[in-house]
Image: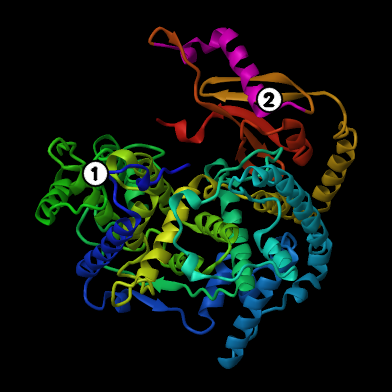
Amino acid sequence: MNVESWTDSPDLPTPQQHDRLCLESFWSEVETIRSDSEPDSSRRDSRQSEDGEQEELWLQDAGLSPLVTGEEEDVDNAVLLSTLTKTQAAAVQRRIDSYTCSLRKRNKTPARHVRDVFASPIAQSAVPETHNSEPDTHRNMESVTKTQRSAVSGQETQGLQMDEIFITDVAYCEQAAILLKQAKLPQNNSSQCRRDDGALPRVICPQCRLGVTRVLDLSQQDMKKVRQLALIDMTALCDLLGLEVKRHKTCKRKIPESCLFGVPLASLVESDQKIKPNTQIPLFLQTLLSFLEKKGLDSEGILRVPGSQSRIKVLQQKLENSFYRHSFSWDEVSPNDAAALLKKFIRELPAPLLTAEHLNSFSAVRDIADLKQKLHVLNLLVLLLPEPNRNTLKALLEFLSKVVLSERRNRMNLWAVSTIMAPNLFLHKAVPSKLAVDGPEKGQAERAADIMRLLIRYQDLLWTVPNFLLSQVRKLNENSSRRYQFYDKRIKHLLRKIHADSRDKPDKNSGEQCRTVKIQLGELSFSMEFRLTINSRASDLMSQFYKELHASDNSRGLLKRNGSTTYPDCAIYEVGGNIGEHCLDPETHLFDLYNNNPGGEWIIKLRSSSRGQ
């Protein structure tokens, strides 16, 4: 996204006037949040975790609670630990050591050491030793670095800004470890936090032959494993960067008698799904954002110009009473009042949109000097958000991007939008925050808005699953299935037979082969053969599918709508093998995918978001 600057037009404010206007708007939002908050609400609603509780909660979220509870077999812990890199495993050990130290203070039984888990006879036979990926990490980093140098050499000669190369094949914590060894980590300089909108570089991800995997492309079971591994990698990365992040626990609060404002996001989405299946964000928020996109993008000062407080209270009451009755009319609602309702809806959530557990981690990103490492942490944090929060945040950021793109008409550039929206996301009555301090300090406003600006600018990148995490999930699934052979000799014999049969499969360097693809479209179910070559992509398979679908007599009901030919919104899913369910990117090279997961099936069906609608 290339955002044009206000200063390109003679009737727009000067940079000094623009900064002053943004600063005033920031602290105006802070005062609004303070006035809406109840006295001492933060002390009542949130508390810092006690000694040792931080580590216990962390191990639980990382899927390693059996290490401290001893409720399951050691092999369950070894399966997850076997997928970790050296730096990730070290971060786990630090948390266990800290937890053990706190238990000794309380005279409790200490937790198991990681090496004790691998010393277990079951664990040793069930899974291989922890994979030390350091040589591969260096190799991947070196190859991409060479690509980066060749890519930017021409730009430097032409005087253009250098693009950032975003590597996702190597664990983020391992990338930071390599830079630390090379003493190439930049030092933080808060004075350089504020930059012009146009100064944000373009971030390029080297194209992977397995395509791009987005958050909604994976099954819930695999996303659970992604979150566990993302938490471990983020913690290891923060350890290397010297960031101490403390989580807050939000206590139960009395839910107001309301159906829209002040209701937990998960509850709103769950109730709305009864009205509209597969709803990802609250219906009220969908309607509000849709109205703002139609009426507010051209409104000067949208988000910045406050609406009428009296009208907003009346509107809120009317919406509570009539929104679900479909009797509320938006015809007389002003865009500024609707924008104020949007910010009020976010502020009045019982818990922060960024969650009480991770809000401090989002805030700590402002203390990281390197842009790519900021994006590394933000990417992992987005993956850690609960699904309703992540989807709602995505919808909000997509709207804010549209506001920025309409800057010429609404006079709201990226920095202005970020400065105004930052307090609404980073300040919450349930969680104390260091962003709110006495006095309108410019540095505080700029550092908070800088995080918001990155979320808006690089949202497409942040909502992807890094390749290294997907590889770890595949390895975790393989190791999990491998463990069962030690509990039943018959299964062990069957797995040996399968392994022997797999030797007869074509070599990964062979030229061509046929692959059977299943088709599942409601009552229509059949299979088709696809000629697989080294250069075959998912888009090629979809083209063949639509041709065969169009020629099929059984597909007339699917294709004929209003007298015209339309294709259903379908996608290719990789199912089984070392993955649960994975929606493929059109640029996925299918031959590489087959060699990566020969036991998986390929199924063409309606996209998950299209079902039930």
Q: Position of residue 462 (x, y in %)?
A: 53, 50
Say if 479 sits above or below 275 in the image.
below
Residue 552 covered by magenta stretch: yes
Q: Quadrant of residue 587?
A: top right
Q: What amino acid does circle 1 point to?
A: Glu
The residue that label 2 is drawn on is 517
Quadrant assignment for the C terminus: top left
Label 1: few (<14), some (14–19) or many (≥20) C-alpha neighbours in 10 Å: some
Q: Quadrant of residue 584?
A: top right
Q: Secondary structure at mark 1?
A: loop
Say if 166 sits above or below 505 in the image.
below
Q: Position of residue 96 (x, y in %)?
A: 64, 78
Between disc 1 and disc 2, the foreground one is 1
Residue at horizontal 24 percent and vertical 36 percent from the top: 295
Q: Nearer the viewer, residue 236 or 193?
A: 193
Tell me whether circle 1 and circle 2 mark residues in contact (CB < 8 Å).
no
Give the label on residue 13, or none.
none
Q: Which residues are magenta?
A: 535-561
Residue 274 appears in the picture as rendered: no
The residue that label 1 is drawn on is 300
Label 2: few (<14), some (14–19) or many (≥20) C-alpha neighbours in 10 Å: some
Q: Nearer the viewer, residue 299 or 425?
A: 299
Q: Secondary structure at mark 2?
A: strand
